[in-house]
Image (tube, helix red, strand yellow):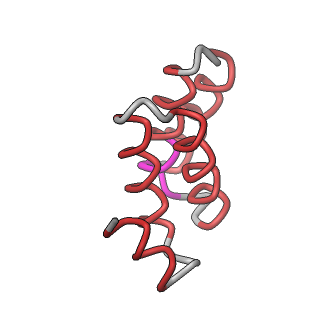
Amino acid sequence: AAFRQSVTINPDFAPGYRALGEMLVYQGKVDEGLKQLHTAARLAPNDPRIHESLAKALEAKGLHVEAKEEMRKAQEAVR
């Protein structure tokens, strides 16, 4: 509830979307989690932690090519 509230209060708060997305993936709600993680990535395209979280969620969905691309983006963001 707190993660949902954080993005309701501040819809541009990328870390809130990341936390919400990670929690949903952990709960097995991968599709819903991916939606939140994609929003986080759109809001903060240079945050490597968001791309790592997105990669893990894509792996959980079996989308290996897309997950690899997100890991590449995470590595680029660190440089």
Residue 4, quarter of the rendered image: bottom left
Residue shown at the point (52%, 33%) measured from the top left: 30
Residue 6, quarter of the rendered image: bottom left
Can you say whether 58 is above or below 74 in the image?
Answer: above
Describe residue 69's horizontal placement relative to residue 52 as left or right.
right
What stretch of residues is rendered in magenta? 47-51
Query: Residue 78: horizontal and vertical position, in percent?
Result: 45, 49
Describe residue 9's horizontal placement relative to residue 64 as left or right.
left
Describe residue 52's horizontal placement relative to residue 40 as left or right.
left
Quadrant where the N terminus is found in the figure = bottom left
SS assignment for the magenta stretch, majority: helix
Residue sitting at the far front: 1
Between 48 and 2, the one lying in front of the other is 2
Query: Residue 43: horizontal and vertical position, in percent?
Result: 62, 67
Between 38 and 44, the one lying in front of the other is 38
- 32 magenta-colored: no
Can you say whether 32 is above or below 63 in the image?
Answer: below
Residue shown at the point (41%, 49%) measured from the top left: 49
Describe residue 66's horizontal placement relative to residue 18 as left or right.
right
